[in-house]
Image (spheres, helix red, strand yellow):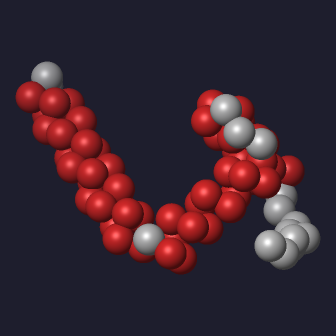
Amino acid sequence: MRKLIIEVSDEMFEKIKDSAKKSGINEEKFIAEILARYIIDPHIMKSEAVKNAYQECGEINLEIANL
């Protein structure tokens, strides 16, 4: 296994730190999991994007219905 040194903004680091904490893992493991999903299993990212799009559309439809 190799180590990489990356530079991220303070805002991005806080997002990484918060997401890692919610997942119960450290920042390094969280980033490794993101890379594995994106590079090794890119279809997972696509299905998550589709899921998110459907949820967003559903929320918009509910807002329209409540007008």
- Which residue: 67% across, 32% down? 24
Q: In what quadrant of the picture does the C terminus appear?
A: top left
Left or right of residue 7: residue 35: left
Whether residue 11 appears in this view of the structure is: no
User: Please, is residue 12 above or below residue 60 in the view?
Assistant: below
Q: Which residue is located at x 59 percent, y 60 percent?
A: 34
Q: Quadrant of the N terminus?
A: bottom right
Q: Nearer the viewer, residue 16 or 42?
A: 42
11 left or right of 56?
right
Residue sitting at the far top: 66
Horizontal relation, residue 10 to residue 52: left or right: right
Q: Position of residue 45 (x, y in %)?
A: 41, 64
Q: Residue furthest left?
A: 65
* Residue 29 image offset from top left, x and y in percent: 72, 52
Instruction: Give how far across and how far down residue 15 sits, in percent.
Output: 70, 44
Nearest the eye: 47 or 65: 47
38 sits left or right of 35 in the view: left
Toward the viewer: 12 or 40?
Answer: 40
Which residue does the image show at 68% across and 61% down from the upper left?
32
Residue 17, by quadrant, is top right
Residue at image coords 61%, 68%: 35
Q: Is residue 23 visible?
A: yes
Count the marks: how many?
0
Pinpoint residue 39: horizontal percent, then vertical percent: 53, 76
Above or below, comparing residue 19 to residue 65 in the picture: below
